[in-house]
Image (spheres, rainbow, N blue to C red):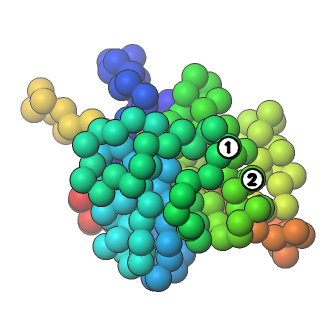
């Protein structure tokens, strides 16, 4: 995964804070206004704050560990399958990737259970080619809840260099979207964002 090439040590618990422009890109195609959002891998809270700025009415920010985010709702293991105390309309997060993407797959599987039982939609930030693997067809091609992805037209800078060289991230990313529907209304769509590629934060 491009976040941690050979020149970088893997960050503990795959804690890679998401720049606010990535959430703004999601909001170009998904109406977040008035939403009660569950940010289930909140880390230091950057995505939670960006969701509020994008119009979310309330953000339930949880994580398996508390990294000091002042808006931290409760310590919660998303993969436990339990339910948080607070209700929500949607789940939006940048999940931990894990070895060979297995943690990210689990986030999709558990997220699908949540939206099947409670409604709403699931939006996960993942490598743009995450849906290519034949072992994941049940999560994408064959999943009636998968409605498409928003391909990011800018690459996310996960690390700031300290050697004076310009950052040149290798990884393309996308928001993958699932909605609670019994039968898929149409084929999954691909959209593109952000419109303004000059955004830097």
Report the residue at 36% width, 59% height from top: 48
- On the image, numbered disc 1 is attached to which residue? 81
**Which of 8/108 is in front?**
108
Identify the secondary structure beneath mark 2.
helix
**Which of 167/50 is in front?**
50
Identify the secondary structure beneath mark 1.
loop
Labels 1 & 2 near each other (Cβ < 8 A): yes
First-in-chain label (1 vs 2): 1
Residue 201, compared with residue 121, is above or below; it is above
Mark 2: few/some/many CA within 10 Å (<14, 14-19, 20+): some
Mark 1: few/some/many CA within 10 Å (<14, 14-19, 20+): few
CA separation in Å, label 1 and label 2:
8 Å
Report the residue at 73% width, 54% height from top: 112
Residue 51 visible here: yes
- On the image, numbered disc 2 is attached to which residue? 113
Classify residue 105 by image quadrant. top right
Q: Position of residue 189 (x, y in %)?
A: 70, 68
Q: Position of residue 129 (x, y in %)?
A: 62, 43
Report the residue at 43% width, 43% height from top: 75
Quarter of the image that includes the C terminus? bottom left
Residue 190, compared with residue 75, is above or below; it is below
Query: In the picture provided, is 114 more to the left or to the right than 69?
Result: right
Q: Which mark is residue 34?
A: none
Classify residue 153 by image quadrant. bottom left
Report the residue at 57% width, 43% height from top: 78
């Amino acid at each position: 995964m491009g976040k941690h090439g050979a020149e970088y040590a893997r960050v503990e618990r795959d804690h890679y804070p998401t720049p606010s422009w990535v959430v703004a890109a999601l909001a170009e195609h998904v109406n977040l206004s008035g939403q009660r959002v569950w940010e289930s891998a909140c880390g230091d809270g950057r995505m939670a704050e960006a969701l509020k700025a994008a119009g979310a009415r309330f953000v339930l920010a949880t994580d398996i560990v508390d990294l000091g985010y002042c808006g931290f709702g409760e310590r919660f293991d998303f993969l436990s399958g339990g339910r948080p105390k607070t209700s929500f309309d949607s789940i939006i997060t940048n999940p931990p990737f894990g070895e060979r993407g297995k943690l990210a797959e689990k986030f999709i599987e558990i997220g699908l259970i949540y939206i099947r039982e409670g409604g709403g939609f699931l939006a996960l930030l993942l490598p743009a080619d995450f849906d290519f693997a034949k072992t994941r067809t049940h999560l994408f091609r064959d999943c009636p809840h998968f409605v498409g992805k928003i391909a990011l037209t800018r690459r996310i800078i996960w690390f700031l260099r300290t050697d004076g060289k310009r950052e040149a991230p290798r990884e393309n990313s996308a928001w993958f979207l699932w909605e609670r529907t019994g039968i898929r209304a149409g084929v999954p769509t691909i959209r593109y964002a952000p419109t303004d590629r000059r955004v830097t934060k």
